[in-house]
Image (spheres, grey):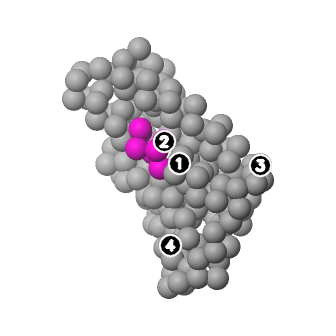
Amino acid sequence: MNLPNKLTVFRIILIPIFMLLLAITWPWGQLTVGGAVIPIQQLIAAIVFIVASLTDMLDGKIARKNHLVTNFGKFADPLADKMLVMTAFIFLVALGKAPAWVVAIIVCRELAVTGLRLLIVEQNGQVMAAAMPGKIKTTTQMLSIIFLLLNDIFFAAIHFPIGLVLLYICLFFTIYSGADYFIQNRQVFKDTND
């Protein structure tokens, strides 16, 4: 198992830790910032998410630079990303920090594009590479999650919902990149008898 794959496995291991930090009330106390009360466990969960997000950036760079791309990496890296992001969005809805309808659109897009990727692999045996809109989508998703978790801590004094602004930017790129994938790969849906 090479270093990029180890980073991907590490990211997968961080997902249940992130979940436990948000699902269980821990006796670690709270921070009071600008009148906002934030559980310390939420801050720790945000740090775990940031570390996991950084491993996503690192594993791909290392794999491409050192020609360490493997079938496991092609499978596990996007799966780990989706598991991490979807878990975070579901908890943000539960915490009242993200609208459920936005998260539902994001989840539906991820499922649809995953299905499209499977069709492409089945038809021509190649994994569909992430295009630039998809990379922007992933970056804005991760940034929106970080700022939604930390917004009360760092932006309570100025009362600016940067996390929600980033969430709506992420929603735009989620829809745009999903449509782009389907348009670019519409031939997948043509019957071979046509």
Mark 2, secondary structure of its residue: helix
Percent position of residue 21, x then y: 68, 48
Q: Are marks 2 and 1 in contact (CB under 8 Å)?
A: yes
Q: Is residue 184 visible?
A: no
Could you tell whether 137 is left or right of 108 in the image?
Answer: left
- Residue at x 60%, y 51% (from the top left corner): 45
Give the mark nearest the N terminus, 2 or 4.
2
* Chain-order first, disc 3 or disc 2: 3
The stretch of residues the image draws in magenta is 50-56
Amino acid type at image mark 4: Phe
Asked if 60 appears above or below 20 in the picture, the reply is above
- The residue singled out by tag 3 in the image is 24
Q: Main secondary structure of the magenta part?
A: helix
Q: Identify which residue, 94 or 110, lies in the foreground.
A: 94
Residue placed under numbered mark 1 in the picture: 49
Q: CB atoms at circles 2 and 4 under 8 Å apart?
A: no
Q: Residue 35 in the image: x percent, y percent? A: 64, 82
Relative image position of residue 13 (x, y in whole percent): 58, 31
Tag 4 residue: 154
